[in-house]
Amino acid sequence: MQFPIQHAALALRGKPPAELPHGLLAVPPEVREFIEERRTQWSPEVFAKAELGMLNLDTVSWYFDGLNMQVMYRETPQGPEVLAVGRDEVFAFKQRVPRDERKELKTFMGYLST
C-alpha cells in the first residue's frame, strides 16, 4: 500500500511552522493499516524491533512529507511527539536543550526518499 494522495501534508502546505502540528500527533488509521501490511512481510522478530520506529516515522511523514520542513520529534508508543518544526524552531530547540537530552530524539527532513 502507498499512502493515498490525500494525506495531511497536502492540507498543511504553505502554512508557517508555528501553524503546523506540534505535540503528540494522532496516528491516522491509514498509517496503522500500512504498518499492519508490513507485519506480514517481515519475520516477527524483525517487525517487533522496527514497529515503534515505523509507527512514528510514518506518522510524521503523513503530516509533514513534502513540506520541506525539518521536524524534531520524540518517539512514543502512542505516536510521535513533535517538539520543533522548521529550521528556526529546531535551531532554537537545539540551543535550549542540552545535547544529552536530545540524543534520543529523531529528525525528519521534510521528505521521505523512495
Image (cartoon, grey):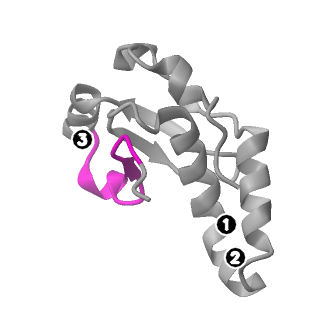
Q: CA distance from mark 2 to mark 1?
A: 6 Å
Residue located beneath label 1 in the image? 51
Q: Which of 55 and 83 lies nearest the eye of the viewer? A: 55
In this rendering, would 2 be left or right of 33?
A: left
Disc 1 crowd rating (10 Å Cα; few below 14, some 14-19, many 20+) is some
Name the residue type under label 1: Glu
Q: CA distance from mark 3 to mark 2?
A: 32 Å
Q: Which mark is residue 94?
A: 3
In this rendering, would 9 be left or right of 72?
A: right
**Marks 3 and 2, the one that precedes in the sequence:** 2
Query: In the image, which residues are magenta?
Result: 97-111
Name the residue type under label 2: Phe
Mark 3: secondary structure: helix
Residue 7, given in percent of the width and then of the height, sits at 62, 32
Tags 3 and 2 in contact by the CB under 8 Å rule? no
Answer whether residue 94 is magenta in the image.
no
Q: Which mark is residue 47?
A: 2
Residue 39, given in percent of the width and then of the height, sits at 77, 71
Residue 23, given in percent of the width and then of the height, sits at 54, 30
Q: Which of 23 and 28 lies nearest the eye of the viewer? A: 28
Q: Residue at x 71, y 55 (%)?
A: 1
